[in-house]
Amino acid sequence: MSAGVRVMVVDDHPMWREGVARDLTEAGHLVVATSGEGRQAVRVAAAARPDLVVLDLQLPDVSGVEVIRGLRAALPEVRVLMLSASGEPQSVLDAVKAGATGYLVKSAAPAEFLDAVRRTAAGEPVFTPGLAGLVLGEYRRLAAGPPAGSGYDEAPRLTERETEVLRLVAKGLSYKQIAERLGVSHRTVQNHVQNTLGKLQLHNRVELTRYAIERGLDD
C-alpha cells in the first residue's frame, strides 16, 4: 500500500519485536505501538487503532488466539497477521478461526514478511507456503455443511439482503464501504454479517469470505 500501513507489533522477545518494527518502518509503514504481553496489547490497540497487528502466537500471559479475539472485539475491522515459530496445523486453524487474516512462520524471509504485511492489510488471506492448502481444505469442509441425512439443510437459507452483503464481503469491501453502497448504517451491516455467520455456523469474516468464494459469490 503506497501510503503505508498503521501496524502494531506484539511479541514477547524485545530484540525480535524491535527488529520487526524497524523493518516495517524502513519499508514505509507506521508502527503505532508495540507490546510484549497479550492483555496489554488489546488495551493499547484500542487506543492506537492500527490497521494491522503482527502477532506472535506464544505470549507470556495469554495465548495469541485469545489476543485475536480481544482485538477483533475491540476493533472489528483490524487485520491480524500471525508471525509464529509454530507451523503446527492446529495452531494455524485455531488462529484463523479466531479471526487472523494471515499466518507466517518466523523463518520467512524479510521480503516475504513485508509482502505478507501489504497483502494482509488489504484483506487478502496470506499463509506460509504449505499452510494455505491446509486452511483451504478446512474452509471447504466448513462450506460443505452438514452431511446428507443429518437432519439439517445443506444450504442454509439467507435473506436477499444477507446474500447481497455476503457478495460484497467476498469482494473485499469493508463494512463501511458496504454500508455506503447499500445506503444503510454500519451497525446494520454488522448485524447482517453476524446473522449470516450464525446461519452458516462460521466464526469470522475470513471464513465467511472463503464460504462465499467457494460458491462463486465473488464474481
Image (cartoon, rainbow, N blue to C red):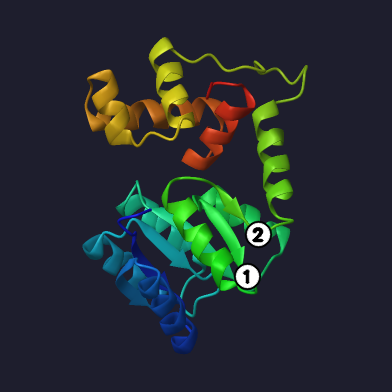
Q: Position of residue 116 (x, y in %)?
A: 52, 58
Which residue is pictured at 70% across the width and 26% down the height? 146
Which residue is pictured at 21% across the width and 27% down the height? 185
Callout 1 crowding tier (Cα within 10 Å): few <14, some 14–19, many ≥20 = some
Circle 1 SS class: loop
**Is residue 153 toward the left or the right of residue 71 in the image?**
right
**In which quarter of the view is residue 201 placed?**
top right
**Separation of residues labelled 1 and 2 (CA atoms):** 8 Å
Which residue is pictured at 64% across the width and 53% down the height? 93
**Is residue 185 toward the left or the right of residue 149 in the image?**
left
Return the residue nearer the eye: 149 or 211: 211
Is 123 placed above or below 210 here?
below
Q: Which residue is mark 1?
A: 108
Return the residue nearer the eye: 136 or 38: 136
Q: Which residue is mark 2?
A: 128
Of mark 1 and mark 2, the one earlier in the sequence is 1
**In which quarter of the view is residue 48 placed?**
bottom left
Asked whether disc 1 touches disc 2, contact meaning CB atoms under 8 Å apart, the reply is yes
Q: Position of residue 43 (x, y in %)?
A: 28, 67
**Is residue 75 toward the left or the right of residue 156 in the image?**
left
**Is residue 43 toward the left or the right of residue 53 in the image?**
left
